[in-house]
Amino acid sequence: AQKITQTQPGMFVQEKEAVTLDCTYDTSDPSYGLFWYKQPSSGEMIFLIYQGSYDQQNATEGRYSLNFQKARKSANLVISASQLGDSAMYFCAMREGGLTGGGNKLTFGTGTQLKVEL
Amino acid sequence: DVKVTQSSRYLVKRTGEKVFLECVQDMDHENMFWYRQDPGLGLRLIYFSYDVKMKEKGDIPEGYSVSREKKERFSLILESASTNQTSMYLCASSLPQQGGAFFGQGTRLTVV
């Protein structure tokens, strides 16, 4: 079974509009973390936002917010006031287990290609 | 500024060659990772290391090996390159108590 599912291979949004990128996850571990990364066409992976499984409030970072619905196992990324520079591939990722111990490996989804149009 | 550096942006190798992809981080991170990125498949973990000389297999280790002799350097080795290993390879590092990861710029490997 997929641990991270991103069902939108591609999305279009008009400049200045808000857009939601979907992410659902699957884990039986009570302690986990969820991440969103942005990958522009240049290829580098840019960390955007993090949500811990025990965090009571949804994470926000500037124009990015994470809509965390624990019971639904979803962690959607909301980008407000889209800009042309937001055009990129977006990946949702999960770290399972606590922060101690080795590894802390991240499992990634297949990504959503976002195109912001004028 | 944190930095993860991969030795090459683009690499072309012949089938059967032994290929080394190098990754260096300057953040004193314990954890280091090698991912492979293919269209429609996202990032898949090949190997990771949580300490010097320690390594664990990820989801797709076949055809690859790794080496971590020093904390700052993590090498991915393709023992005998094949055309199905043509891909983008991404190195990352993280602290154990952090969970997230910092990525290098990626190496686009073409095996002909």
Image (cartoon, coloured by chain):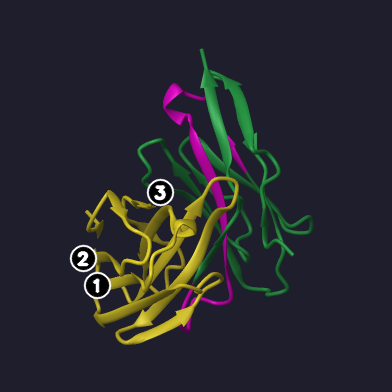
Chain colours: A green, B yellow
Residue A114 locus on image (x, y percent): 55, 31
User: Does the CB distance between marks 2 and 3 fall below 8 Å?
Assistant: no
Q: Look at mark 1 in the image and give the residue it sits on.
A: B73
* Amino acid under disc 2: Asp
Residue A5: numbered disc: none
- Spatial distance from mark 2 to mark 1, Cα to Cα? 9 Å
Of tags 1 and 3, the one toward the viewer is 1
In this rendering, does residue B4 appear at all?
no
The part of the image, by quadrant, that contains residue A108 is bottom right
Helix, strand or loop for disc 1: strand
- Chain under callout 2: B
Q: Look at mark 2 in the image and give the residue it sits on.
A: B26
Q: Is residue B46 magenta?
A: no
- Spatial distance from mark 2 to mark 3, Cα to Cα? 17 Å
Q: Residue at x 68, y 74 (%)?
A: A30
Q: Is residue A45 above or below residue A64?
A: below
**Residue range highlighted in magenta:** A77-104
- Nearest the camera: B54 or A74? B54
The part of the image, by quadrant, that contains residue B23 is bottom left
Residue A45: numbered disc: 3
Q: Earlier in the sequence, mark 2 or mark 1?
A: 2
